Structures are given as C-alpha cells and as structure tokens.
Image (cartoon, rainbow, N blue to C red):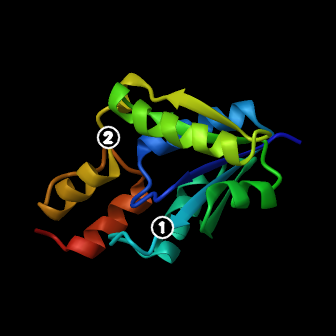
Amino acid sequence: MKIAVYPGSFDPITNGHLDIVRRAGQMFDRVIVAVAINTEKKPLFSVDERRRLAVDAVKGLQNVSVDEFAGLLIKYARRKRATAVVRGLRAVSDFEFEFQLALMNRKLDPSIETIFLMTKDEYTFISSRLVKEIGELGGNVSDFVPRGVERAMKRKFGSR
C-alpha cells in the first residue's frame, strides 16, 4: 500500500489544500493529512480545532484520513509507513524553501520521497495567512475555504 503524508499547519485548511489532498488521493492508496503541532507558532485555531476542521473538509474522500503530529516529520512518516511526503507549491517563492526541506528529509531517510504538486491556477493566491487576515477584517472568505472553516472563522471573529 502506497501511503503519503501531507503535512502542514492548516490554520485553517483552505480550498487550495483540499485540491492538493484530492489530487494526492488519486496518486496514493492512502493520504494522511497531518496537522502539525508547532509550539513556536501562535495559530488562530487550536490543534484540535484544526484537526476537526480538516476532518470535516475531507469527509467523503475514502482514502484520506486526518491526524496530528509533533516533532520531526520524517519520524512521523516512518511511523505511518509512508513512502512519500506531499507538498503543495503555489509559486516559485515556495519552491526554494520546500526544496531545502525535501533535501533535508531525503538525507534523513532516502526511502521517503517528497512529491511536489503545483496548485491549480485558481488557488495560487490563497494562503491561510491571507484568509485569516480577510476574516479578521470582516471580509468574505467563502471562496477560499470549506463551509465548516468559514463558519468557524465567523465564530472566532464575530461579525465585524
């Protein structure tokens, strides 16, 4: 069974993330959306909220599950018996950072490949950071995130 891990903070999960998940799901027998716990970041949503929002967003995708992890990604991928790590790229600016991570991961475990998927054109401008800013300022985020995330953001920010 070919298993891929798609790691990220997913704060919040966006339609761009879901596009990558769906496409990875066509390439692998199983895809694990791995919500990262990073104590150095100040996320809008707690790890439990991010996990629940991701679970809701991927329901209906038969071979996709959601988990959370802390620590070294490559150790987590090994524990899950993953053969690949999936990363989404929006622009050339993403590539430099992601390439460096991929090379480091390859050095740590050459048996786990990094697969880069380019986002579709309509998602290249979407980032969790921008979506949070729009939501905080009272803008409409419905085109950028799943319905459950939109509702959760409205609860967080109220109606501004």
Q: Residue 126 shows which numbered tag?
A: 2
Q: Is residue 148 in view from this perspective?
A: yes
- For image coordinates 41% across by 32% down, the residue present is 96
The percent coordinates of residue 34 (x first, y second) are 61, 58
Q: Residue 26 shows which numbered tag?
A: none
Going by the numbered disc 1, the residue's amino acid type is Arg
- Distance of mark 1 from mark 2, alpha carbons? 17 Å
Q: Name which quarter of the figure residue 102 lies in.
A: top right
Q: Mark 1 and mark 2 in contact? Answer it, CB < 8 Å.
A: no
Identify whether 134 is placed above or below 86.
Answer: below
Q: Earlier in the sequence, mark 1 or mark 2?
A: 1
Mark 2: few/some/many CA within 10 Å (<14, 14-19, 20+): some
Image quarter in which the N terminus is found: top right
Count numbered badges in the picture: 2
The percent coordinates of residue 72 (x first, y second) are 62, 61
Q: Is residue 124 left or right of residue 16?
A: left
Q: Name which quarter of the figure residue 153 lies in.
A: bottom left
Image quarter in which the C terminus is found: bottom left
- The kind of secondary structure element at disc 2 is loop
Q: Nearer the viewer, residue 108 or 124?
A: 108
Q: Residue 50 shows which numbered tag?
A: 1
Mark 1: few/some/many CA within 10 Å (<14, 14-19, 20+): many
Q: Nearer the viewer, residue 8 or 48?
A: 8
